[in-house]
Image (cartoon, helix red, strand yellow):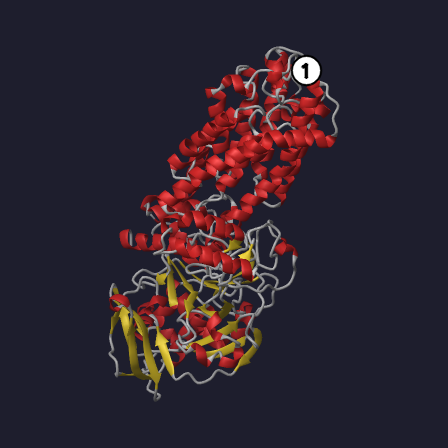
C-alpha cells in the first residue's frame, strides 16, 4: 500500500496548488479518493466521524443493482435465443447480454462522467459520487437495441438539464436516470416502444414478437406469460428491470443497509395494490381486469419503486412525506397504465410527476410541524395574557 | 416523586479509554488561563493588564454587550500574559498563580436572601457565568428570570463524566445551589437523572426529578427541555451543569467564588485515564504527564467530549465549562479503498454499510474525516440522532441560507450546537452541522436578540 501511495503522491504533484495542472485537481481528486480514503482530519464540529461516506453509500446501491443487472444480461440473451430458436446454454445467454449491455454501460459512464468532471473542474468542487449510480441505472432502464448515440444524447440531456442546471448532485428536482429515459421516450419513440425494441437484434430478424406485457395489454392482446414468469423476469422489457425476484434481492440489500427507504417501497406497493384492486372491481377493460398483483410484477414497477423512487434527492425528504410520496407513486403508476395506454409504462411518469410534487409534500409536512410549534407559542401567550 | 421520561432515537458511542472512576493527583499548575471563546457571543473588554495582581474572584474581563457578564479569575496571582491573535483578538488571559488573595463577599443568611440580592451577588461574584440561558446558549441575563431551570446529571456523550461519582463530596454545596436557584424562580428546579440507576441526587430538596431513559443525545438539556417544559417564543430557561451549581452553592456558603473543576481525562492511548480534581483554567500538562502518551504531537486534545468539544493544544488550558478532556489520535493517514462497504469495520459507524455495529465492545477512534465533504444527499439519517420534534436537516439548510423567519419557525430557539454532535458524526456528507447551527444562532442573536 505504501508503494502505491508513494506513486500517487508523485503523480499528484502537478495537480497541487501552483502546479501546472492545478486546474484539473478536482478530476485528479476523484481518482485519488477512489483509491484512498484521504488523510483529512476533522477541523470543525465533531472531532470523530462515522466510517460511512457518500462513496460507500453509492457503492452499496451499485451492489444492490448487481443481481438485477446480471439477470438482465442473462435475460437479454435468453429473449434473443428463444425468439430466434437457436439452441443456447446459460453462459451463451449471459455472454450475449454482456456483449450488448457492456457498451451501453461504458457509453453512459463515459459521457456522464465527462460532463460531471468538466463541471467539477469548472466550478472547482470535488466530483460527487451521485453519477456512479445514475450512470448504471440509465442503461439498465433502456431498450436493449437502443443506438449508443441516442443513449449518449439522453445522458447528456439528463446530466445537463436535470442535474447540473439545478446545481449538481443533491440539488436536482427530477431523478436524472428517469429524465434520461423520459427524454429518449419522447425524442425517439420508435426506439422506445413497440414490439421490435425489447428483444436483442429483433429488427434484424423477421417474425419476432417481443411486445412487453403492458404493451400487449394496451393493444388489447392476450398475455401469454404466467405470474411466475413475470416474477422471475423471463419476459421482454428494458435491459434489467424485468425480474422482480432479483430486484427484491436488491431491495433487501438497500433496506438492510439502511440506504434505501423502506417506507417509500412499502407505501408504493400499497398505493399500487389499492388502485389495482379498485380497477379489478371496476373491470371495464382488459387493463382494468389485469390482476392487481400482476401489476406489481410487470413493467418497471418493482425496479422503479426500489431503485428510482427511493432516490433520496428527488424523493420526499421527511418521514411522513416519504409515506405520502411513495403511496402516490404507486397510485399514479397504475392510473397512467390503465387510463393512458399511449404510455403503457406508468412508473416512469409517475415517479417523475411525484419528483415534482415531493417538495410540495415536504412543505406541508414541515408546515404542520411549524404550525404545531406556533400553536404551542400562541397557547402560552393566551395563558399569560 | 420522580417522573420517567423516555427519549427515543440516538445512539450510544462506546469508545475505548473512558476515565476509570478513581482520582489521580494533578501536578500543580503554575499558570491558569481564561479563554473568551469559551463564552458564546461574548466580546471581551479587559479589566486588567499584564503584570496586574489579581485575587481569586476578581473580574478579569466583561462582555462588551452586557456589563453584568463578568468573568473572574479562578486563582489568585499575576496576569502574566494576554495572548492575542489576528486582529488583536484575545485568545487567552494567562494568570500565574501567586499568593492567596481572595475577593470575599458578605452573604446574608439564606432566609434573608431576596431575589434581587441573589442576582446582585451572582453578577458581582462572577458566578452568573456558570448559568447558561436558552435560547442562544449565552450566559444568563438576570433582568428576565427564566420560566424554569434545568440541571442534567444524565450524561450520555462519549467520555462524559459520571456526575454521581464526581459530586459525591459536594452534595451540600449542590443543595445550597439548588436552594438559591429555586428561590429565584419560586419553584423546584428540574433535575434529570439516569433511568434505572441509583443516584444520590434523589435525596435533594427543592428539585423535580426526571428519570431519563435514552442514549445520546438524551443527556443534552435541549432534548430534556423539549420533553419536560418546551421553550416557546419569548421565553427563557436556564441551564446549569451540576458541578457549576455546586460552585454557586459554595459561593453562597463562603462568599468566595468557587472555581473547582473536576475533569475526566479520557483517551484510548492514555496509559491511565482517570479523574482529576482541579481548578478552572488549569494547564492541560498538569493533568497529563509526558509519559502518559508515547507521541504527544500526534494526538488531539479536546476540551469537552469528542463530539462537541473544542480543539486545544497540549500547551493549552482546561476550558471554563467542560468536565472532560478527551485525547484522541490524529487520523492523518490514508486508507486504501476505505470506502468499500463492510471493509475497515473497526472504524466506528452507525451505518449498516459496515459491520461495525456487530462488533461489541469499546472502539478506538481517531480524527480522520473518513471521506470528504459532499452535498447533502442522504435523507432521514439526521432525524435518527435528533430526538426532538424539529426537522434537523431543514433547520440546518435554513441556517445555511441565514433565513431568520425559517430558522425561527423551524425551532432554532430550542437547540444549541452541541445537540448536533451526533448528526455531525453520522452525516454521510460530512457536513459541519454544529458550525452551521452556531452561525444560525449568531444571526438570530444579532437580528432578533
Picture quadrant of residue A250: top right
- The residue lying at 40 percent from left, 55 percent from top is A14
- The residue lying at 44 percent from left, 73 percent from top is B246
Instruction: State whether residue A286 appears in this view.
Output: yes
A115 to B417, vertically: above or below: above
Task: Measuring from the top left, give residue A53's x and y in whole percent.
Answer: 52, 50
A102 to B138, vertically: above or below: above
Residue on which the image places disc 1: A223
Task: Measuring from the top left, give residue B385's x and y in whole percent.
Answer: 52, 52
- Closer to the camera, B369 or B210? B369
Task: Measuring from the top left, give residue B224's x and y in whole percent.
Answer: 49, 56
Picture quadrant of residue B240: bottom left
Q: Chain of mark 1?
A: A
Left or right: A20 with respect to A85? left
Left or right: A149 with respect to B235? right
- The residue lying at 57 percent from left, 24 percent from top is A143
Q: Quadrant of the C terminus of chain B?
A: bottom left
Instruction: State whether residue B388 appears in this view.
Output: no
Amino acid at each position: 500500500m505504501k508503494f502505491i501511495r508513494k506513486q500517487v503522491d508523485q503523480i499528484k504533484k502537478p495537480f497541487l496548488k501552483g502546479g501546472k495542472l492545478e486546474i484539473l485537481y478536482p478530476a485528479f481528486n476523484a481518482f485519488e479518493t477512489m483509491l484512498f480514503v484521504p488523510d483529512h482530519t476533522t477541523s470543525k464540529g465533531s472531532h470523530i466521524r462515522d466510517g460511512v461516506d457518500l462513496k460507500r453509500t453509492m457503492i452499496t446501491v451499485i451492489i444492490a443493482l448487481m443481481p438485477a443487472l446480471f439477470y438482465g444480461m442473462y435475460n437479454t440473451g435468453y429473449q434473443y435465443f428463444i425468439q430466434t430458436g437457436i439452441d443456447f446454454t446459460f453462459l451463451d445467454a449471459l455472454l450475449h447480454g454482456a456483449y450488448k449491455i457492456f457498451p451501453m454501460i461504458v457509453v453512459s459512464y463515459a459521457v456522464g462522467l465527462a460532463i460531471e468532471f468538466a463541471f467539477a473542474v469548472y466550478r472547482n468542487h470535488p466530483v460527487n459520487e451521485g453519477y456512479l449510480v445514475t450512470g448504471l441505472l440509465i442503461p439498465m432502464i433502456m431498450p436493449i437495441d437502443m443506438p449508443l448515440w441516442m443513449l449518449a444524447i439522453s445522458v447528456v440531456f439528463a446530466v445537463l438539464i436535470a442535474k447540473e442546471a439545478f446545481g449538481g448532485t443533491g440539488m436536482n428536482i427530477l431523478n436524472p436516470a428517469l429524465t434520461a429515459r423520459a427524454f429518449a421516450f419522447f425524442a425517439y419513440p420508435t426506439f422506445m416502444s413497440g414490439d421490435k425494441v425489447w428483444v436483442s437484434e429483433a429488427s434484424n430478424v423477421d417474425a419476432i414478437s417481443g411486445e412487453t406485457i403492458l404493451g400487449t395489454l394496451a393493444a388489447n392482446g392476450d398475455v401469454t406469460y404466467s405470474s411466475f414468469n413475470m416474477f422471475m423476469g423471463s419476459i421482454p422489457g428494458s435491459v434489467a428491470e424485468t425480474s422482480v425476484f432479483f430486484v427484491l434481492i436488491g431491495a433487501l440489500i438497500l433496506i438492510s443497509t439502511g440506504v434505501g427507504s423502506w417506507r417509500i417501497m412499502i407505501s408504493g406497493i400499497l398505493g399500487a395494490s389499492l388502485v389495482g384492486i379498485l380497477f379489478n372491481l371496476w373491470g371495464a377493460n382488459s387493463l382494468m381486469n389485469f390482476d392487481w398483483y400482476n401489476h406489481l410484477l410487470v413493467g418497471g414497477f418493482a425496479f422503479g419503486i426500489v431503485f428510482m423512487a427511493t432516490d433520496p434527492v428527488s424523493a420526499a425528504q421527511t418521514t411522513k412525506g416519504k409515506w405520502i410520496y411513495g403511496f402516490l407513486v404507486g397510485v399514479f403508476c397504475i392510473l397512467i397504465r390503465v387510463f393512458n395506454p399511449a404510455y403503457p409504462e406508468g412508473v416512469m411518469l409517475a415517479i417523475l410527476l411525484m419528483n415534482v410534487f415531493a417538495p410540495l409534500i415536504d412543505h406541508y409536512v414541515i408546515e404542520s410541524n411549524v404550525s404545531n410549534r406556533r400553536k404551542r407559542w400562541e397557547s402560552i401567550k393566551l395563558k399569560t395574557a | 416523586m420522580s417522573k420517567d421520561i423516555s427519549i427515543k432515537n440516538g445512539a450510544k458511542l462506546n469508545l475505548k479509554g473512558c476515565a476509570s472512576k478513581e482520582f489521580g493527583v494533578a501536578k500543580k499548575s503554575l499558570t491558569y488561563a481564561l479563554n473568551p471563546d469559551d463564552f458564546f457571543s461574548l466580546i471581551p473588554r479587559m479589566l486588567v493588564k499584564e503584570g496586574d495582581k489579581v485575587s481569586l474572584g476578581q473580574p478579569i474581563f466583561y462582555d462588551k454587550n452586557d456589563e453584568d457578564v463578568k468573568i473572574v479569575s479562578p486563582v489568585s496571582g499575576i496576569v502574566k500574559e494576554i495572548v492575542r491573535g489576528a486582529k488583536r483578538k484575545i485568545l487567552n488571559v494567562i494568570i500565574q498563580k501567586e499568593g492567596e488573595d481572595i475577593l470575599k463577599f458578605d452573604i446574608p443568611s439564606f432566609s434573608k436572601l431576596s431575589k434581587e440580592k441573589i442576582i446582585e451577588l451572582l453578577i458581582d461574584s462572577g458566578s452568573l457565568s456558570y448559568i447558561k440561558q436558552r435560547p442562544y446558549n449565552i450566559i444568563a441575563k438576570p433582568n428576565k428570570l427564566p420560566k424554569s431551570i434545568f440541571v442534567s446529571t444524565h450524561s450520555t456523550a462519549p467520555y462524559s463524566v459520571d456526575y454521581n461519582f464526581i459530586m459525591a463530596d459536594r452534595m451540600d454545596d449542590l443543595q445550597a445551589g439548588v436552594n438559591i436557584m429555586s428561590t429565584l424562580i419560586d419553584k423546584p428546579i428540574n433535575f434529570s437523572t439516569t433511568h434505572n440507576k441509583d443516584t444520590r441526587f434523589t435525596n435533594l430538596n427543592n428539585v423535580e426529578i426526571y428519570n431519563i431513559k435514552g442514549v445520546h443525545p438524551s443527556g443534552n438539556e435541549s432534548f430534556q427541555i423539549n420533553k419536560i417544559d418546551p421553550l416557546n417564543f419569548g421565553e427563557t430557561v436556564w441551564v446549569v451543569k451540576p458541578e457549576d451549581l455546586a460552585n454557586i452553592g459554595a459561593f453562597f456558603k463562603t462568599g468566595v467564588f468557587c472555581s473547582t473543576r473536576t475533569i475526566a481525562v479520557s483517551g484510548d492511548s492514555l496509559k491511565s485515564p482517570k479523574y482529576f480534581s482541579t481548578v478552572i483554567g488549569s494547564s492541560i500538562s498538569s493533568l497529563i504527564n509526558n509519559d502518559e502518551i508515547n507521541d504527544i504531537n500526534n494526538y488531539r486534545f479536546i476540551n469537552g467530549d469528542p463530539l462537541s468539544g473544542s480543539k486545544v493544544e497540549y500547551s493549552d488550558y482546561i476550558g471554563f465549562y467542560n468536565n472532560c478532556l478527551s485525547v484522541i489520535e490524529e487520523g492523518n493517514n490514508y486508507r486504501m479503498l476505505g470506502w468499500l462497504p463492510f471493509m475497515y469495520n473497526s472504524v466506528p459507524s452507525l451505518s449498516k454499510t459496515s459491520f461495525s455495529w456487530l462488533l461489541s465492545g469499546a472502539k478506538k477512534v481517531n480524527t480522520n474525516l473518513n471521506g470528504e465533504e459532499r452535498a447533502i444527499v442522504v435523507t432521514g439519517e439526521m432525524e435518527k440522532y435528533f430526538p426532538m420534534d424539529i426537522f434537523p436537516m431543514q433547520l440546518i439548510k435554513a441556517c445555511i441560507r441565514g433565513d431568520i423567519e425559517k430558522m425561527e419557525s423551524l425551532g432554532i430557539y430550542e437547540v444549541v450546537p452541541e445537540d448536533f454532535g451526533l448528526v455531525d458524526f453520522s452525516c454521510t456528507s460530512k457536513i459541519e452541522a454544529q458550525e452551521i447551527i452556531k452561525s444560525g444562532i449568531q444571526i438570530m442573536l444579532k437580528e432578533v436578540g
